Image (cartoon, grey):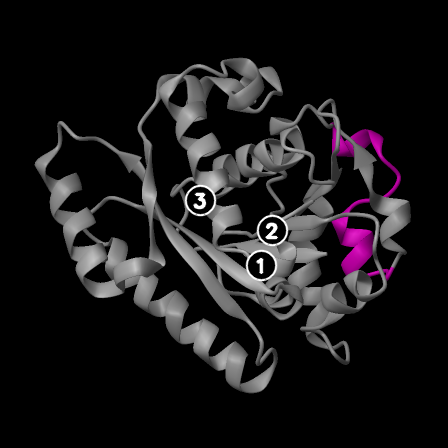
Amino acid sequence: MLTIAIANQKGGVGKTTTAINMATAMAATGWRTLLIDLDPQGNASTGLGVDASEREMSSYDLLVEQAPIEDTVVQTGIPGLEIVPATVDLSGAEVELVSVEERTTRLKSALASHGGHDVCFIDCPPSLGLLTLNALCAADTLLVPLQCEFFALEGLSQLLKTVEQVQQRLNPSLGIIGVVLTMFDRRNRLTDEVSEEVRDCLGSLVFDTVIPRNVRLSEAPSHGLPALVYDHSCLGSRAYIALARELIGRFPPERQAA
């Protein structure tokens, strides 16, 4: 199973929207896909129509109680896509894990023996705390959504420093599969300036595909649906389909088929 963490410590950059729609796109192309909701807000869960409060197990149980991952997985309404949902209990996990041995590798241990999926996405919270560290330790690679705004590169440099520390101390094999520009608005001159600056700094690490500002992308979660299902022909959906195609093209050759 290829495990991809979707992370950026800045909120409101499109992490959850990216996680939901990339997972849906991968499932639609035949990949057995798992999405782990590691954000206490639980937006990835509700965005896929899953009410975590009705479930006995969640990502909290996976991390803190060390429940088997098979007991926490829930089938979504999307064929081939399952989720480990999050509840508000997860907000206390950071404090509870502080005194625990191997507190940064709980998720890695949970996924180590799991072979029921081809690809796993982890939707991280907007912080660089223990939950995100668990995701970075468990992941093979990192996908970074980056909003086209003035402070984008400042936040990105913080994240890249954290990734470097994780590589040195906890997960030497962690890679960065790419940076995706989100909330792209061609009518806004600043958007183009930020895009050029990011591409100058990071080069080919930045995906060619950009995710536009799109009303349908914003509406879809309120219906408990990914945008790809809510309106598959909108600009946002088409962008995520293109991004999924580009993402698969960056997988190692042996992983490029589901």
Spatial separation of the CA atoms under disc 2 and disc 3:
11 Å
In the image, residue 114 sits, relative to residue 35, either above or below, namely below
| Whole-percent x, y for residue 159 in the image | 40, 66
Q: Nearer the viewer, mark 3 or mark 1?
A: 1
Q: Identify the residue under disc 2.
A: 256
Residue at the disc numbered 3 = 246
Numbered disc in front, either 2 or 3: 2
- In reply to whether residue 242 is colored magenta, the answer given is no
Q: Where is residue 255 shown, x and y percent of the image?
A: 64, 56
Q: Callout 1: few (<14), some (14-19), or many (20+) C-alpha neighbours within 10 Å?
A: few
Place residue 221 in its image quadrant: top right
Q: Is residue 94 above or below residue 16?
A: below
Percent of width and height locating residue 31: 69, 40
Task: Provide the residue span drawn in magenta.
Answer: 51-66
| Residue occupying image coordinates x 77% and y 47% | 117
Give the quadrant of the C terminus. Answer: top right
Q: Toward the viewer: 120 or 129?
A: 120
The amino acid marked with disc number 1 is: Pro
| Screen quadrant of the N terminus | bottom right
Residue 253 numbered mark, or none: 1
Dot 1 falls on a residue whose secondary structure is: helix
Q: Amino acid at mark 2?
A: Gln
